[in-house]
Amino acid sequence: MIIPLQHGLPLLDVRIGHSDAFRELCDRNLDPVLPDITVKALVDTGASITVIDSALVRRLRLRDRGVCRVRGFDGDLHADPGTREYLNYDLSLAIPGVGGGAMVRVGDLQSVGAPLNCEDYQLLLGLDVLQHCVLTLRLAEDLMEIDKAG
């Protein structure tokens, strides 16, 4: 699938929601689960893990799973580059393919919640998801090509 870059950024629409494990627990207890939502994600090949904006965590009412130690991410260029702790969340994520079905789906993804403070995207898509894809950035053409791996 070929996607034009938006303002020079590799942005994708992705569907996110509660993890499959959480959904199964809610099904067993007959508890309702909020539906998945579509958000913009920035493809970040320098991030090992996916980061979800804190406002989106609240909107989806995700439960934290404790803290995750992260090095190098906090949005502050002048901060100490040491390791910091961020709340950790389980979610599901799908990258839609042509025709509306999921090209890639990760049902139980562990992500970090942090304020991204950006209007263009609400998620940083890290290598934990991108490892399931073949990604080609064609920057000279302002295009990104993404397909399912294998």
Image (spheres, grey):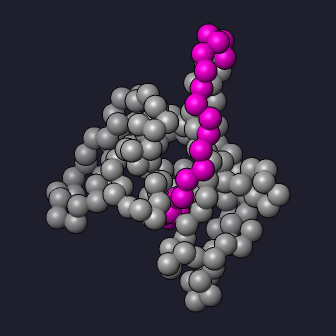
User: In the displayed image of the protein, which residue is found farthest to the top?
Assistant: 29
Q: Is residue 122 above or below residue 26?
A: below
Query: In the picture, residue 75 is in which quadrant?
Result: bottom left
Tell whether 76 sits left or right of 91.
left
Whether the magenta-drawn stretch holds residue 40 is answered as yes
Expressed as whole percent of the image width and height from the top left, the position of residue 132 reads 66, 54
Depth check: give the residue in front, 42 or 110.
42
Say which of 130 and 27 sits in front.
Answer: 27
**Segment tinted magenta in the rendering:** 27-45
Instruction: Say which residue appears at 59% left-offset and 83% top-offset.
Output: 142
Look at the image and tell me whether residue 92 can be seen. Answer: no
Q: Please determine whether, in this image, residue 72 is positioned above or below residue 9.
A: above
In the displayed orientation, state which residue is furthest to the right: 99
In the image, is 138 to the left or to the right of 45?
Answer: right
Residue 37 placement, left or right of 112:
right
48 or 66, which is in the foreground?
66
**Is 45 situated above or below 90?**
below
Q: Is residue 139 visible?
A: yes
Residue 124 painted magenta = no
Please count the marks in the image: 0
Q: For the point 58% across and 89% down, which residue is it?
A: 140
Asked if 26 appears above or below 113 in the picture, the reply is above
Q: Position of residue 122 (x, y in %)?
A: 46, 54
For the view shown, which residue lies furthest in the bottom direction? 140
The quarter of the image holding the C terminus is: bottom right
Q: Is residue 100 left or right of residue 11?
A: right
Q: Residue at x 28, y 55 (%)?
A: 74
What residue is rendered at 79% in x and 61% in y? 98
Could you say where residue 1 lies in the image, as x and y percent from the top left? 74, 68
Residue 71: x %, y % from top left: 30, 52
